[in-house]
Image (cartoon, rainbow, N blue to C red):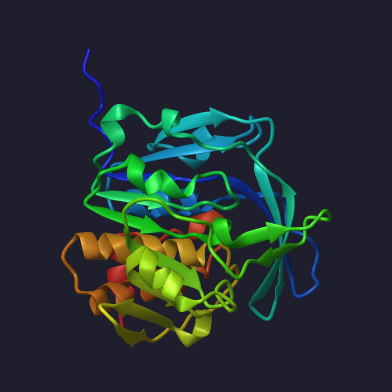
Amino acid sequence: MTSNPPPSFVALGHLTFDVNIVDNGPPSSHIPGGAAAYAALTAQKHDISTGVISSVGDDYPAEMILDGIDFRKVESEHTATFANYYDSGDRTQVLMASGNRITQAAVPDEWIRPDVFFAGPLLHELPTECVNWFDPKLSCLVPSGWLRRWAHDGAISHADTLPPFRGKKWDVIVVSEAEIESLPEQQLFDLGEIVCVTRGENGSRIWQTGEWIEILAVEANPVDFTGAGDIWSTAFVIALSEGKSVAEAGIYASTASAISIESIGLSGCPSRESIEARLP
C-alpha cells in the first residue's frame, strides 16, 4: 500500500463560519471560511498539493469545502464563528464561538518540510512558536488572531503589541493597516524578513531590508471582502516561491485579492490562470 506524498503547501489555523452584515443589510447565512481554507484553496487552484490542519466542530463541511486537500482535524465542540459588520469596506468583528487549540502533536512527521508553511491564527489557537514546528522553504504568517482581543460580548479589538515570540524569524508576514494602527512597526521587522501591509483600495506596502515599496491596488467590483488578505498572502508567497521578485509578487497578490472580492466567500479563491489573465 502506497501513501500519498506529503503536501507542498501546509496551512494551519481555525476554519470558520462567517456571518456578514454589509452596510446594515440583513445577515448572511453561515459562510464557511477561515484563513487556512482561503490559503489552501488558492494553493490548490495553483495545482499545488495542499494540506490543512485545523480545529473545527462536526458542523463544518470540511470534506466538501476542502475536496482534494489533505485535511487533518483536531476535534472541537465548536467551530470558530465571526459576525463581520462591513461599512463602506471597513470591518467590525464580533466573536460568536471559538474552536480548540492546535498543538504540535497534530502535525504529521512527514509534513514538516513543505515548500510553503502558512500560519493563519484567527484567535489564539496556535502558539507563537509554531514556526519552529516546520522546516519549510518559505514560511508565511498572517497574525490577525494574535492581535485580536475580545470582550464578554464578543466585540473584537486589536492589541497594541504582539505576544512574545521564541524561535526563528518568519520569511513573510502579512498584516492589514487597520490591525497594526497602534502596533510599533519594529515588532514586525523583528519578526519577519519581509513585512507586507495591505491597505484595501489603497494597495499595499512591502518592507524588505530596511526599505518600503508601494504596490497599487487592482480595480475591482467588490461584493465580499472576507478572505481578501489571506488570498493576497497566499498568492504573494506562492509567487515568491516560484522565483518572482518582491515587487512582482506584490502585483500578483494585488491582482489575486481583486479577483477574490468579486465573489462570495471561498468561491473567490483565484486560479493561476485567472490571475495571470488579469495582471495589470
Query: Hey, which quadrant is residue 157 in on the image?
Result: bottom right
Residue 208 versus residue 30: which sits nearer the camera?
208
- Quadrant the N terminus occupies: top left
Left or right of residue 164: residue 20:
right
Query: Hey, which quadrant is residue 181 in on the image?
Result: bottom right
- Most distant residue in the left direction: 243
Q: Where is residue 80 in the image (x, y as percent from the top left)?
A: 65, 45
Q: From what the image shows, is residue 48 above or below residue 268?
A: above
- The residue shown at (35%, 28%) is 108
Asked if residue 62 shows in the view, the reply is yes
- Most distant residue in the top direction: 1
Asked if residue 259 shows in the view, the reply is no
Q: Position of residue 193 (x, y in %)?
A: 29, 67
Q: From what the image shows, is residue 172 above or below residue 63?
A: below
- The residue shown at (37%, 72%) is 189
Total marks in image: 0
Q: Position of residue 203 (x, y in %)?
A: 44, 83
Left or right of residue 9: residue 26:
right
- The residue shown at (42%, 40%) is 52
Q: Position of residue 221 (x, y in %)?
A: 54, 79
Residue 21 versus residue 215: which sits nearer the camera?
215
Q: From what the image shows, is residue 192 above or below residue 104?
A: below
Residue 269 versus residue 216: which sits nearer the camera?
216
- Quadrant the C terminus occupies: bottom left
